[in-house]
Image (spheres, grey):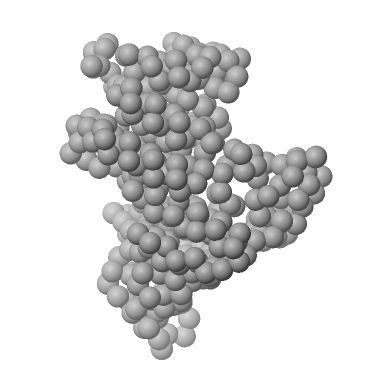
Amino acid sequence: MHKNNHKLRIGIVGAGNIVRTRHLPALKKHPEVEIVAVSNLAYESAENFCSENLPQATPIKNWPDLVALPDIDIVWIGTPPYMHSAVTISALEAGKHVFCQARMSMDLAEAEEMLAVSKRYPELVTMLCPPPFGMQADLIVKKILAENYIGRPHHVRLQSFTGNYLDSDAPAHWRQKIEISGLNTLTLGIYVEVLQRWLGDITGVFARGKIIHPMREGYDVIIPDLLSVLCSFENGAEGVLEFSGINALASGDRLEIYGSAGALTCDFTSDVVQAGKIGDRVLHVVDIPRELEGEWRVEEDFLAAVKSKGRVRPDPNFEDGLRYMRVVQAVADSRARNEWVAIKG
């Protein structure tokens, strides 16, 4: 299968900012990896990307031609969500392993189809890009919760505020365009992924959204600038999740978990975790021991899974993606119907 001294040969579909700044430098560190082809929205941008970063790689005009190349082992998808399901399914059917940028898909139906096709090809590795938020604190938060340090969680508060969309004269960002981003709204999917990793599945939502600047340079925005979600968790906790792109002078993203025996907070900007028990005067900063410090190793993890021939399962996988897309879909349905929406696993 692998030509050229058993190197893993990668074709990139969608070589945007995250691929250039994050994935490419990490992939280049691996001598057993070769990036052989790049397809971008415009052929010229693929040409420029190759000449600037990968002079040996071939720019390819149309992504289906890249996916069809017989000597490619891996398709690396860096496009926005509107292309994820089509490229993923084509790549799997062409016998390629798939790494796909997050958010997984436009909506739940696409995510279900992607997972179903991946199950037809169990020998092929599929992985989604994990969120960088909470990565460093991931293991220590899991440990604190698993050791029952704060008791049984009953109240979860998350705030994720920026002022990115405050300027009403700015053109619509691609994340504000439903035909490119789908139902994904602000940082909802990212933080649902993190919360479900730490607290288990969200089982129901009631959501309200507001579009402060609906018209941007003639484009009609229908993705909210502001989103509030009430939710319930499988473990019995109630959650209040608030997201905004129109909050001036906002402080960093923050999570608070209150339990029967204490409380835990995580500041996602600094990755500082604080905890305390009933009777403590204040929360204390939790030192993260070196061996529990999480780090960005996504390329490493994916390549290890490919090389393991199915023994290693990468994380997050398509099942994890489906779990957060269920919530993204339910939030959109709740907003549309103005009612509580139960989420069935």
Q: Position of residue 101 (x, y in %)?
A: 46, 38
Image quadrant where residue 182 sits: top right
Whether 44 is drawn above or below 279: the answer is above
Q: Position of residue 54 (x, y in %)?
A: 47, 16
**Residue 121, visible in the rendered structure:** yes
Q: Closer to the camera, 147 or 121?
A: 121
Image quadrant where residue 163 sits: bottom right
Q: Which residue is drawn at 71% across and 56% down?
A: 211
- Residue with the most extreme bottom position: 279
Q: Where is residue 267 in the image (x, y as percent from the top left)?
A: 51, 63
Q: Residue at x 45, y 45 (%)?
A: 109
**Residue 309 relative to residue 338: left or right:** left
- Quadrant into which the C terminus falls: bottom left
- Quadrant into which the N terminus falls: top left
- Residue with the most extreme front position: 337
Whether 123 is drawn above or below 203: the answer is above
**Residue 296, visible in the rendered structure:** no
